[in-house]
Image (tube, helix red, strand yellow):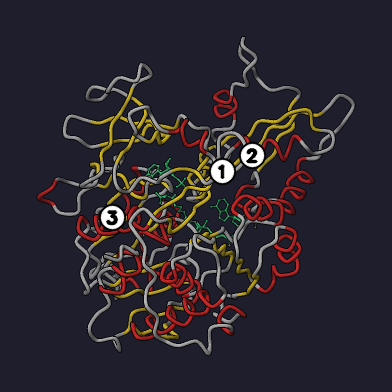
Amino acid sequence: MNENLFAAIASAFPADRNRTAIEIAEPSTGTIYREVTWADIEAQTARLANMLQSLKLAPGARVAVQTEKSVEALMLYLAVLRAGYVYLPLNTAYQASEIEYFVGNAEPAMFVCSTRNYAWTKPITDAAGVAHLFTLDEDGIGTVLDAATDQPKTHSIAHKSANDLAAILYTSGTTGRSKGAMLSHGNLLSNAKTLVDYWDWSERDVLIHALPIFHVHGLFVASHCFLLTGAKLIWFSKFDQRGVIAQLKRASVFMGVPTLYVRLLADSRLTREVCSRMRLFIAGSAPLLIETFNEFRERTGHTILERYGMSETNMLCSNPYLASQGERRGGTVGFPLPGVDVRLSNDRAERCDVDEIGGIEVRGPNVFSGYWRMPEKTKEEFTSDGWFKTGDVGKRDERGYFTIVGRSKDLIISGGYNVYPAEIESYINDMPGVAESAVIGVPHPDFGEAVVAIAVAKTGATLDADAMIATLKKGIANFKVPKRVFVAAELPRNAMGKVQKNLLRDTHHSLFARE
Ligand code: MCA
Ligand code: AMP
């Protein structure tokens, strides 16, 4: 049996291939300006898969993609699966030094970039010996599609077993550089099937897709649920609450990070009436504030379903969809998904009691096989009995609901993007005149958490906070750049000499408080 994820997707295509699969909406108005049928998906993924195979890439070759969001980019992802290669999506905000690391670490055989990034991407891919560099832009035009134009529109799906690698997703590390989480066809398919079932998807569903497609949330969770049920997508190349609200009347499901819900609520056009056809609002990737959960229920009559996931594990926990399985409880991430084992361990590696706080560990067919070319790191992140240590800290109540109470990893989640303080501190510490720095996350009304840095000058040097921000903007992805930099005489330390970030967080807690 072919266990290629694309084989499962193809077998779920609706019988009527002329049906619309994707409606593409203009972000700020929601006006639909193009439609894509299931026949188009079939033909375009076949052409692209044939083109990929004509390049005679080695088995297991990585195809790295850093392009703006377009339906064609989604087709490219599906074509890589279909042709049996390994997909490696990269955040569009990454700049040259970040891309250089990913290319050096993953050694892709092929790279697809935006035309506007070609000039700086080419020297990087050349130096790393990447054999093929193509382009693809937000309007769906690029050399990667040109190369596929004359290819046949039929293709027989590459044979894969469940353990074969389908994708590598880079996630930052608390120390050192990013690690590539290796996800197999089986990991992705098992989780997608579970979600389709648990959230009661059907071909009648219409999903508003407004998330980026270089992370688990937009690429896997949203896209796979739609693809495995023959449902319909209303596709936004970027999130804009005005366009989304204009299309809510026609939709049944919405998925978003908490920032998207905050922005929807800030628009008075979000009413009960526009949500009357909706059956499900799903939130995840970062903590959803209880205030947002309550305000959304009051305004729309809908109770947001919060779920919890990770790049390494796909989705682990979800609040229930069906009332018969329980209520959706704000501030919790619900129950472990069917087939996924989740446990809590205290610092003596014993199982936690009800309401006792501990480290969240997971086991199941959804859990990745390890970090790309980092066997030692992989070993560190699993317990001796084979459970993956998420680095999240939580508790379980007497009814079985899990709540995430914090993180043992030093991580900031800003607008659904992860930022590791150690990485930003190392950039700041390398700046002229900087003796040391500390990077923290503080509450932010839009992004949930915002990145803030505190820097100490070397003796005799003076630091200009605004100039530091401007320099960082030129070097690293914009969402990682501190919103504010403070220059301090020294960093608070405990008796062991460790920087007391909790004191810094307390000092700057109200920096972005709403007026
Ligand atoms: C944009 N900016 C940000 C962020 N996004 N700053 C901090 N955090 C952010 N997330 C800044 C830019 O640096 C820029 O600043 C300014 O905002 C405008 O940029 P723009 O790109 O126009 O912003 P936007 O379009 O308004 O984007 C905000 C957003 C976006 C829509 C919330 O960040 C987003 O799509 N987030 C979703 C991320 C996501 O999908 N996460 C899922 C990960 P300046 O002008 O100063 O440069 S998957 C995951 O976590 C697990 C598996 C799970 O459970 O799902
Ligand atoms: P990533 O490494 O980008 O996949 O991010 C995964 C991390 O996002 C998890 O380890 C959690 O810390 C966080 N996360 C995801 N969903 C939630 C949620 N519903 N509530 C709180 N944190 C979440």
Q: Is residue 219 above or below residue 178?
A: below
Q: Residue at x 42, y 46 (%)?
A: 312
Label 1 to label 2: alpha-carbon separation? 8 Å
Q: Position of residue 471 (x, y in %)?
A: 77, 49
Q: Is mark 1 within 8 Å of ligand 1?
A: yes
Q: Residue at x 50, y 62 (%)?
A: 59
Other residues around mark 3 within 10 Å, as few (<14) / some (14–19) / many (≥20): many
Query: In this picture, is 18 found above or below 394?
Result: below
Among all residues in the image, which is located at the extreme right?
460
N-terminal-most mark, 3 or 2: 3
Amino acid under label 2?
A: Glu
The residue tagged 1 is: 419
Q: Residue 58, relative to residue 392: is it above or below?
A: below
The amino acid at mark 3 is Ser
Q: Secondary structure at mark 2?
A: helix
Distance (Cα) linking label 3 and label 1:
28 Å
Q: Quadrant of the N terminus?
A: bottom left
Which residue lies under the disc numbered 2? 423
Horizontal side of 128 relative to 276 (left or right) equals right
Q: Are marks 1 and 2 in contact (CB under 8 Å)?
A: yes
Residue 249 in the image: x percent, y percent?
Answer: 29, 74
Judge left or right: residue 358 versus residue 419: left
What x and y, as percent, mark residue 493? 64, 17
Q: What residue appears at the point 28 percent right and 55 percent down from the top-left corner?
A: 190
Task: Decide which of 225, 429 is in the foreground and name it.
Answer: 225
Select label 3 or label 1 by which is in front: 3
Picture quadrant of ligand 2: top left
- Between 114 and 486, the one lying in front of the other is 114
What number is the disc on residue 190? 3
